[in-house]
Structures are given as C-alpha cells and as structure tokens.
Amino acid sequence: MNQAIHTIPLDWYILLSSILFCIGVMGVLFRRNAIIIFMSIELMLNAVNLLLVAFSAYHNDAAGQVFVFFTMAVAAAEIAVGLAILVVVYRNTKSTDIDVLNRLKG
Amino acid sequence: MTVYLFAILGVFAILSALMVVLTKNPIHSILYLVLTFFAIAGEYVLLNAQFLAIVNIIVYAGAIMVLFLFVVMLLNLNQETEPHKSVLRKLIAVIAAGLLLVVLVGSLKGADNMSIKPFSQNTGLIENLGKVLFNDFLLPFEVSAILFLAAMVGAVMLGKKDIK
Amino acid sequence: MMQLAALIPFFPLAGFIIIGLLNKRIPKNMAAMFACAMLLISFGLSLSVFMNISGHATEVQLLPWINVGSFSASFNFLLDPLSSVFLLIITGVGFLIHIYSIGYMHDDEKHNIFFAYLNLFIFFMLVLVLGSSYLLMFVGWEGVGLSSYLLIGFWFKNNSYNNAAKKAFIMNRIGDLGFLLGIILLFITFGSSDYLTIFPKVQGFASGNAMITTITLLLFVGAIGKSAQIPLYTWLPDAMAGPTPVSALIHAATMVTAGIYMVARSGILYALAPVSMYVVALIGVVTAVFAATIALTQNDIKKVLAYSTVSQLGYMFLGLGVGAFSASVFHVMTHAFFKALLFLGAGSVIHGLAGEQDIRNMGGLRKKLPVTFITFLLATLAISGIPPFSGFFSKDEILAHAFASNKIFWVLGVIGSMMTAFYMFRLLFLTFYGTYRGDEHKVHPHESPKVMTIPLIILAILSTIGGFVGVPESLGGTSQISKFLDPVFQPAQTKMMMVENSSSISEIALMGITVAVVLLSILLAWYMYVSRKRIPSPEGTKLPLLTNVSYHKYYVDEIYNAVITKPLDTISVFLKNILDNKLIDGIVNATGKFTEWVSSLMRFVQTGNVDFYLLAMVIGIACIIFFKLM
C-alpha cells in the first residue's frame, strides 16, 4: 500500500487539478446563466480541494485535509447566500441573465 | 493498477466537467456536476482520504446540488431560455481560460522538486483528522459555526418575501 | 576695563530697541534725550578706551557664534589704536549730530523713529569698527547699509526719495558681492576670517602673491561700493534726499569711511599686493578729480557737498594706495569734523530758509545767519587746506606721500585741491555774500536755535585745532597721530618697499606749492563771485559744452540706466512673459489637463458588466502569476 499511492507522481495530480480549475474558469466566462456560473465556481473549489488533499497525502500532513474540510463548509455557506441573492434578483428582473445586471455602468 | 484507476477517474472527471459547461439545459448541467463530484471522491479514496471522500459526496453531491436543483425547480429554469453570448466572446473566454491553464502549468513545472515523505497510513483516517481538527484548529472550527449562523440568517432574510 | 568696552555698541542698540518699541508713546523730548544719552555714554566709554589703549591689540571675547565642522566664527571685539580712533570719531561726531537733530527734526512727525534709526546706525557702525574678524565687520557693513536705506528714505511719502534709498542700497550690494567673495577667499586661504589669525600668517607670504592680490582687489570692490568711488559713486549725491543730519552723519563722517577703515585694517594684506595698492591709489585720485569737476557747476548746496565728499574719499584712498595709512586715517578724522560741520551748516541754512536748497536763491546770509556763516567759513578754510586748519595737515601729508610714490598722482592731487578750494569758496560766496536773491516776503531767513548752533561751534573748534595732533616733523611738530597709529601699521610699513620720505626741505616746498595754488583758486573764486557778482544761470538755460557736461554729472546716471538697467528690465519682462506665464503655468495646467484626459479614458473600464469584470479578473490573475514567474 505504501508504494502504491506514491506510484502516481504528484505532478499528475497538479495537472489534473489545474485542468479542472481552468474548465471552471471557462465555465464562468462562457455562460450567461447565473446558476451555471455558480456551478462552475463549485467546480473550481473542488479542483482546489483535490490539490490540497493530494499534497496532504504526499506530505503526511493532516492540516491539508482539515483545510479541505473548512473549504467545504465555507462553500456550503456561500452557495446558500448566493442562491438567495439570485432568487431576489430573479424576483426583480424575471431573468437570471447576468448581462442584465449592468446598473453599475460608469 | 493505481495508475489506470487514476487515469480513468481523471478522464471521467474532466469529461463530466466539460459537459457541465457545455450543455444547454441547466438540469443536465447539475447532473453532470454530480458525476464530477463522484469522480473526485474516487480520487480522494485513491489518496487514502477516506473521510473526505464520503464527506464530499454527502455535502456536495447530497446537499449542495440538491439545493441547486431546488432553486432551478423554484424558478422554473429547466428550459433553455437564455440567449447565448456572441461567438467572439466565447472565443475570448476559451482563450482566457487556456491562458490561465498554460500559466499555471508553466509555473508549477518550474517549481523545485517537492520532497515526498514516507507514507503513513493514518493520515486521512477520521480518527486522526478528528484529533488534528480539535487540537490545532479548534478556533477556526468554532468560528465556522458562527459563519454558518450568519449565512443562515442572511439566506433567510434575503429569501423572505416582502410583507407589504 | 577693556571688557567694559565691549558694551560700547550696546548702548545705542538699547536706544534703538527702546525708542523703536515705545515710538508713539513717549514725548519727543524724552526720545531725543534718551538717544543722545546713549550716545554720550558710548562716547565716554570710547574716551576711556582711548586713554587706556596700549600698543597691542586686545581682543575682547563675547560669544561663540557659528561652529560647524571645521568652520567657526565668534563675536569678538578688537581694541587697538585704529579702532579706538574710529570709536572716538563715530561716537563723538555722532553725539554732536544727535544734539543737532533735536533742533532740526523738531517739527517732524516721525521724530522719535528718526532717533531710533540714528541709534541703530551708530550701533552697526560700532560693530563694524570693533569687530575682530572680517565676518563681523561684514555684519556691521550690511547693517550700516540697511540703516542708510532707512534713513535716506526717511520721508517715504516721496517716491523719488524711495528710489534714492533703493539706489544706495543696491549699489552697496554690488560692492558687497566683491567683499563677500574676498571673505570667502580669505577663508579658503587662511581657514578663518579673524584678524589675529590672518595677519600673523600673512607675514609669510611673498610680495605680489596672486591670491593676496585677488583678495585685496575683491575687498576693494566692496570699499568702492560703500565709499562711493568710481564706478559705484552715483548713489551718494542721490542720497542727499535724506534729512541733513543723516547726510552729515552717514554720508560724510562715518558710513562712507567704512571702506577706508577696511583697507586700513587690511594694511598688511595690501602691503603684500603692490598691484592692488596701485589700483586703490589710481581709483582714488581719478575719483577725486572727477568728482571735483562735477562739483564745480552744481547749484544745490547738498549736492556740492556730496560731490565734495566723494572727492575727499578719493583723497583718502589715494593716501592708502601710496602707503600713507596713518595719513589717511588722520584725514578721515579731520574730514569728519569739517564735512559734518559743512553739512550741518548747510542744514542750518536750509532750516533758516524754510527748505530752500538752491544757492541761486540764496545770498547775503552773512548778516542774517552769523554763527552759521562763521562756522561755515572755518570749515571751508579747513577743507581747502589752508594752514593752520586741520585739513591742511592731513591733506598735505597724503600729498607728500603721493609725491614720493608717483609724481603724476601728486600733480592730479594738487589739481584736485585747487578745484576743491574753488568750488567750496564758490559755495560760500554765493550763499553768504552779495544780496539776498530769494523772495523776502515769503521767506524770512533766521538763525537756527542754540541746540543747532552749539554743535556747529564745537565742530568748528575741532576743525580748527584738530590738525595739531598730526603736525609733521618737517614743520617742527611731532606727528602724534602717526605715532599713535604706528603699532597698527608697522607690519605693513615694513613690508612695503617704500622710498624713504624726501628731506624736510623738499616737503616744505611741496606744501608751499599747494598752498599757493589753493590761494590762487580762492582769489579766482572771489573775483568771479564777489567782485563780478556772477550768479549761476537759472534752470533751463543753454550752457556751454563743458559746463553742461559737468552740470549733468557727465550723464553717468543716464549711461548706467541705458546700459545696465534697461537690459535687465527687458530680460526680466521677457522671463516673466515667456518663462513664467507660458512655460511654468503651462506645465501646471497641462498636469491638470492630463489627469482629466486619463480619467476620461479610465471611465470606460466601469462598464457595469459583470461579464467583463470576470474576464478582467481572470486575465489579471494570469498576468500576476506570469509575472511572479519572471
């Protein structure tokens, strides 16, 4: 078991995590629906979690996994509030399109 | 053998993620995202982070995605109603993301070789995690409780319909 | 005792401060008495210093002043025969003029502040002669320039008086530039500006050293400005705009002699630079003759006396330049007596005629102003160099040394004496002889009150007998003043390669020639102005060429105006319009406009579009990571 885990070089995990992260970024820039954007943000958070756990395993430090723990907690809270805001916006503008929200135009 | 597992799970995760971004129906996006979470949970198991794998599924796939589904149902968003961005903007988006990927990978490639410590079986076990959490990280733990309280109050306040 | 002497300048300073602060609150009498009392105390102390002075210089330390790195200067006073002579002149003549001013300025509204300014001037002049370093002398130098400005422009409601004051100050400053450069070079060469440090060190230098020559020439530039020699003399006639006591004190007896004091003090430096001595003598004698030619045709009493002062200062510089240091100081003393007397007498005439200054409107005042007339006559005899009056001894000693050094200078000096006698007696005759040419109904000439005539009498006595301290050996006297000043000038005298004075007989012959020539001029003046009753032409008539040029002061002021003032004005107007308005304002305005332009561009970043913000964020992160890599 010891060596089994370490047969996968850390670089591969970094690569995987980066790809997932960038797919998340692309999703944020690519879509206009606010819900999809939220989901892409979740994807990004997960990519980061993956990286943290990988490092935690390779360095034998439990702090990495505890950090993931907290990240998940914060993500949950954030989603709750974010969706609440989205609901309010939908009630006012009857649309979840983010291009509609340009009242801050200078 | 582990390598194959890793490869399969990795590809699965990437494909699901791509589908999340590219499908038109929001419900389908959510379902694909759940699949991605499962794949990532599998990766966690590969890394001996058993507790986190389960927590990932329970919290993310179980609670958060269900929340999304609720909101989508509430707002009746299951149709494809949004107009799409212009092709130019989509192109720019892809290029920007690609740029970020290249930079990230490039920066991490140049990093020094990380020392890999000998593997210990206990990291990732719930017992160990519990000890670290309640010994070293007690304060953040308690503070996150307050964070939840704030989020809860905020969500309820925002979601309330005006009485008038 | 010597320590007490350090207090000498501080009594007039106290007078200035107290009268200045209590200006309107004390009655006129009290202010005047207080000022005169301060001066009397200073005179008393100077007298005691004079009695107790020994041959060496005594330094009285007061306070350390500047101490920066290797540069230090301190307030120290130096008491030696030279400074004690000047102390007596300044406080003595100053005291008499203060008394005179009680009467002259009696009706003036700014009476109290006048006495404050006079005391301030005395204070600075005392600092100048008492200072033991060039730096402290320069403090006094600048201070007397300031006081002169304040006093010339005393009646400031008249704009031309203000211009005269400015002119005096600015010309002084031009000279001061040279002085300052000289002091800086002194610091570079000797590391200090103290007399007692420099003078022993200088003894080791060779004669004709280039650095010493430069230093002495620069110091002399300062003297040219302060003592009104060519080319910086034009401020002195204009300075007659001030009240007559001011003209008497500052522009006859004391401030203008500061240059003489400075050159005399630096005697050893000049002795080692024959080139500078020659320049000093040359400028002195040329100024003496030049100013005398202008004085021949002037019609304002005070202007004649002003040009006469310039001319006499030229004589003093001639004396210094040919190595007759003690003779020049002697002439300073006698000149202070008779020139102050002449000015105060002129003031008395002006006061008696209610402000008339043009001699063409005077005449026949012999009977009406008798005391003034007698004292004026005595002073005129003194300045012309008639024995046994004081001017004779001092001037002839200078001329004797000039003869020994350079025959041409002697000839020019004698010509100058001739002209001096001529224009002074012309002034005397036109003012006091003949019939009164003014309007009898408007002006009632009357004698001045006692408070003004008593100083006149005292000064007249001094002008008459003051020469006896300097009777030269050739006439059988012991030149006491030379002996008194000998310790100061001894080092300088030994350095100069001086031809020993010619034998006594030749000296008597020289004196005889001079006196004969002077008597001839007096007779000529008598002939022209008393026998023939010639009166100078009224204003505006066409004069013969030479007279015209002399009357208009050789148009020097106009030349200066065209050559120096106008180009400077043009340059400064140019600078104001082009540089100041267009360039600097333009830059400041452009900065503002630039900020506006940049912000108008930056406005477009705020689209309000969430989409755009997200894109910007991503690209920003990519850039940050990228640059972190680099």
Image (tube, grey):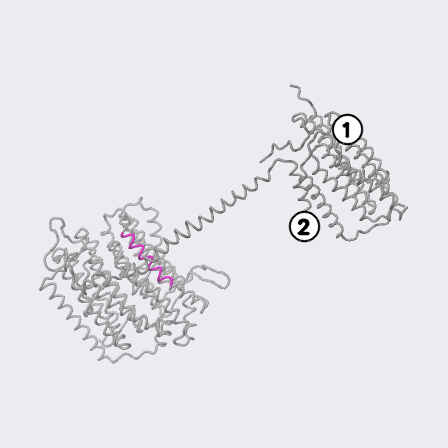
| Amino acid marked by disc 1 | Leu
- Name the foreground residue: C459 vs C351: C351
| Amino acid marked by disc 2 | Phe
In the image, residue B54 above or below residue C294: above
In the image, residue A101 above or below residue C286: above
Locate residue A43 relative to residue C279 in the image: left or right: right
Magenta-colored segment: predominant secondary structure? helix
Query: What residue did someone put label 2 on?
Result: C627
- Name the foreground residue: C144 vs C544: C544
Q: What secondary structure is marked by label 1?
A: helix
Magenta highlight on residue C567: no
The number of discs equals: 2
Magenta segment: C160-177
* Cα separation between marks 2 and 1: 41 Å
Question: Local crowd at mark 1 within 10 Å, few (<14), some, or many (≥20)?
Answer: some
Q: Residue at x 31, y 61 (%)?
A: C563
Query: What residue did someone put label 1 on?
Result: B69
Locate residue C120 relative to residue C193 in the image: left or right: left
Mark sitting on residue C133: none
Q: Position of residue A84 (x, y in %)?
A: 71, 28
Q: Position of residue C273 (x, y in %)?
A: 37, 73
- Name the foreground residue: A84 vs A93: A93
Q: Quadrant of residue B92?
A: top right
Q: What secondary structure is marked by label 2?
A: helix
